[in-house]
Amino acid sequence: MFELTFTLVLFLFPLAYSPGPGNMFFAANSARFGFRKTIPANLGYHMATWVVTFVIGYGFSGTAENYPNIFRYIGYAGSLYVFYLAWLFLSAGKTNEAVCPKDITFWDGVILLTLNPKAYVIISAMFSQFLLLDSSIMLIIWITTVFTLNNLLAFCIWGYIGDKLLYQFRSEKNAKVLNTLFGIILLGVALWMFLKLL
């Protein structure tokens, strides 16, 4: 279980800690309202993350029993998506200012997760790599929990340093360095995902 958890965290690291929609949402709102004001939305986002991830994992396991090649196809799609994300980072400049609502709530977090297509692709790609055909419900719960806690930690870090991070991203030079770093990490993850399927 330790080896699976360690590999899972390594797999998720560039995806969870790179500047995506959720991270930038919480960083921008923390910069505007303060970290504590974002806690309800963060909890809403991650409670929804756990539920959605479990449902996908449970359904994924059952579907995979009837269609064993689905792991391979989703794995290919997931690796292509991560290659695409890497390309976006490598070709990106500075971020635009985020538009923040007047007040953010628990339900804002829930809605942000449920309307984030990137989350569904990442969750499916994750299960295609770490879920076996004979996986137990406990393994699905474990992967779901590790995924959710890892994302929660990432969002808390981004939220806590949001003000400084957004300041850094206003500089084209600093944004290029950060985007290149995350792009290279994502390229490595995509290549690992692809080679694992061969």
Image (cartoon, rainbow, N blue to C red):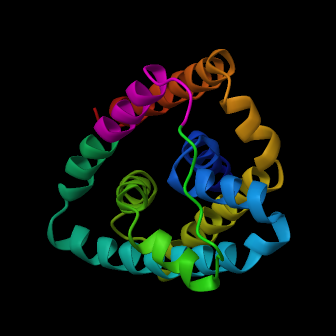
The C terminus is located in which quarter? Answer: top left
Residue 136 seen in this snapshot = no
Residue at x-position 47% and y-position 20%: 90
In the image as oriented, which residue stretches furthest toward the front? 102
Question: x, y (%) of residue 60?
Answer: 31, 71
The answer to whether residue 145 is above or below residue 158 is below
Nearer-the-camera pick, 82 or 88: 88
Image quadrant where residue 119 sits: bottom left
Q: Is residue 6 above or below residue 60?
A: above
Could you tell me which residue is drawn at 55 percent across and 84 percent down?
107
- Depicted 125 relative to depicted 46: above or below: above
Residue at 73% of width from left, 50% of height from top? 158
Residue at the location (44% across, 77% down)?
Answer: 52
Across and down, in percent, residue 125 comes to 37, 52
Magenta span dominant secondary structure: helix
- Examine the image and state in which quarter residue 128 appears: bottom left
In the displayed orientation, state which residue is furthest to the top: 173
109 or 53, nearer to the observer? 109
Magenta residues, as a range? 79-95
